[in-house]
Image (spheres, rainbow, N blue to C red):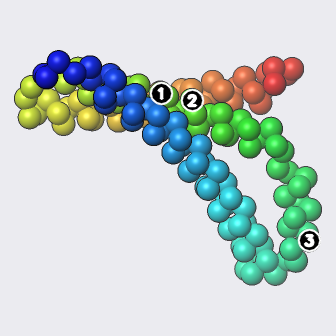
Amino acid sequence: AMGLDPVKYLVVPKLAALLIAFPALTAIAVTLAIIGGWLGTSVVLGYNTALYLEHLHESLAIGDLGVGLAKSIVFACLIGLIAADEGLQVERRVSAIGAAATRSVVYCLVGVLGVDTAVNAFVYFIPGFA
């Protein structure tokens, strides 16, 4: 509109924010899940902390945390690019904005589910891949 590059001033900052926020939120969610699991087993079920930590150590691999953080980065890129593409292609009508937002959400959901399924298949079900 004013001779400004929309990718430079709209897409890149939002993509950079997503690349920072998604892994940070993933790390926070994992931490809170571990704390919630500890509270549930110790307070509700009455098990001691040492038993919880022993089972946590047996079942939680560092590779799983790495895969989760890597997937969050991939999801951030996917969501940012799909949303930017839909937003930049919207027509100049009020009704087109809602349709583009709905398309963007649906494409992001399908994309994230597809990529998540593919990554899990490669990492966890193909022997020797990871």
Residue in the picture at 63% in, 24% down: 118
Placement of the N terminus among the 4 image quadrants = top left
* Secondary structure beneath label 2: helix
Report if the CB atoms under discs 1 and 2 are less than 8 Å apart: yes
Please say if 122 is above or below 41: above
- 90 or 43: nearer the viewer: 90
User: What x and y, as percent, mark residue 103?
Assistant: 29, 29
* Secondary structure beneath label 1: helix
User: What x and y, as percent, mark residue 116?
Assistant: 59, 31
Q: Give the number of the disc on residue 48.
A: none
Q: Quadrant of residue 51?
A: bottom right
Name the amino acid, label 3. Ala
Q: Earlier in the sequence, mark 2 or mark 3?
A: 3
Residue in the picture at 67% in, 54% down: 30
Can see residue 108?
Answer: no
Residue under label 1, please give it: 78
Residue under label 2, please give it: 74
Q: Quadrant of residue 42?
A: bottom right
Q: CA distance from mark 2 to mark 3?
A: 35 Å
Q: Give the number of the disc on residue 50.
A: 3
- 119 or 1: nearer the viewer: 1
Q: CA distance from mark 1 to mark 2?
A: 6 Å
Residue in the picture at 10% in, 33% down: 95
Residue in the picture at 77% in, 30% down: 124
